[in-house]
Image: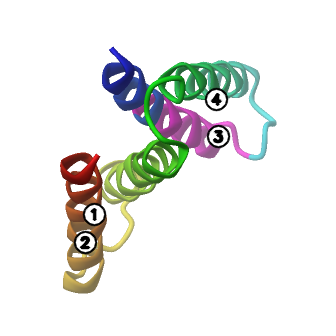
């Protein structure tokens, strides 16, 4: 169950960052509320996952999901560049997440 909490915590982090962008500096109310709620949910789920998963592994995977997810969302929805270098480093992050799970 801890791994499920951790995965959902990472996805909540992606939602938080996406709506942070959409809030335009927290000037728009609805995206701001969603961003704060997703952030709170992300931290709560992370805290639950860390009851069973080592903090180094849990935090690494949580930040990796958040980072890779934010970059992918940025490329798909916010027209950020999709050059080969970015795709290579996203692949490295995802590979690192998988590696951390394997050795845990």
Regarding mark 2 in the picture, which secondary structure is present there?
helix
Q: 52 above or below 68? A: above
Query: What residue sits right under mark 4 in the picture?
Result: 39
Q: Which residue is mark 3?
A: 20
Q: Position of residue 95 (x, y in %)?
A: 20, 63
Question: Could you say which is closer to the camera, residue 2 or residue 34?
Answer: 2
The image's colouring method is rainbow
Q: Is residue 26 above or below residue 33?
A: below
Q: Which mark is residue 50?
A: none
25 is higher (above) or lower (below) than 68: above
Q: Compute the Cα span from label 3 to label 4.
A: 10 Å
Residue at image position (25%, 46%) is 101
**Callout 4 environment at 10 Å: few (<14), some (14 to 19), or many (20+)?**
many
Query: Which of the two labelled residues, at mark 1 and mark 3, occupies the earlier sequence position?
Result: 3
Q: Position of residue 90 (x, y in %)?
A: 28, 67
Label 2–label 3 contact, CB within 8 A: no
Contact check, label 1 and label 3, Cβ < 8 Å: no
Residue contact between numbered discs 1 and 2, judged by CB atoms under 8 Å: yes
Identify the mark at residue 96; answer none if there is no mark: 1
């Amino acid at each position: 169950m801890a791994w499920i909490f951790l995965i959902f915590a990472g996805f909540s982090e992606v939602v938080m960052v996406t709506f942070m962008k959409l809030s335009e500096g927290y000037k728009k109310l609805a995206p701001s509320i969603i961003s704060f709620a997703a952030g709170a949910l992300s931290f709560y789920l992370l805290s639950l996952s860390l009851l069973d998963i080592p903090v180094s592994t849990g935090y690494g995977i949580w930040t990796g999901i958040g980072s890779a997810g934010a970059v992918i969302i940025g490329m798909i929805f916010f027209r950020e560049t999709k050059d080969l270098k970015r795709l290579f480093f996203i692949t490295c992050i995802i590979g690192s997440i998988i590696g951390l799970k394997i050795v845990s």
